Amino acid sequence: MTSSFPSTVRHITVNSPDGTSSFLDTPPPPTNSPNPLMQISYIYSNPANFSIAENTDLKYHESAPTTGPIRSFAPAGASTCVVLDFAPNPTGEEGFMHRTTTLDYVFIMDGELELALDSGEKRIVRKGDVVLQRECMHSWKNISKTEPARFAAVGLGTAGAVEGTMEFSKK
């Protein structure tokens, strides 16, 4: 199954030495498609204890790989921003159960998704909903057979978090 995911445009501001703010020229964000039903767009990340004045965050962000694994899960004290797109799911394929050592602020931008927890609990989340995920074992599934879904998430690395670490369910 081939899907066409929408593009994401990001606008990053910078400050000149005299304090004037401007926009940075930015290429489209790198993307990764772990399966045909999903695409992750890497928007931005920053290290722990960074300085805007010294552009520490910008240097960290620009050091991210543009191919291969994307910095999707922040280390302790850092943050990452991603946009996830889900293709229509005509066969009702389930998402994969996983956990990250992050506190995630998830903003549903479009469509309807099922958020399932390893306890068996499930919630349908819709455009405009906000989910706060606290290191929970979970999966995401687009419940529409014909419409895409999209969310933006900011993940904050919790104590002991290691960049890129994800735990998968043993069930």
Image (cartoon, rainbow, N blue to C red):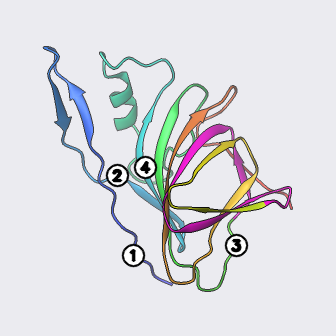
Identify which residue is drawn at 46% across, 82% down.
2
Q: Is the residue marked by circle 1 packed among few (<14), some (14-19), or many (20+) residues within 10 Å?
A: few
The spot of residue 131 in percent (x, y) is 62, 48
- The alpha-carbon separation of the residues under discs 3 and 4 comes to 23 Å
Residue toward you, 119 or 79: 119
Residue tagged by mark 1?
4
Marks 4 and 2: CB-CB under 8 Å? yes
Residue toward you, 78 or 116: 116
Tell me the chief SS of the magenta region. strand
Between discs 3 and 4, the one toward the N terminus: 4
- Amino acid tagged 1: Ser
Residue tagged by mark 2?
29
- The alpha-carbon separation of the residues under discs 4 and 2 comes to 6 Å
Between discs 2 and 1, the one toward the N terminus: 1
Identify which residue is drawn at 62% across, 74% down.
143
Query: Which SS class for mark 4?
Result: strand
Q: Which residues are magenta?
A: 96-121
Q: Which mark is residue 42?
A: 4
User: Is residue 116 a member of the stretch shown in magenta?
Assistant: yes
- Amino acid tagged 2: Pro
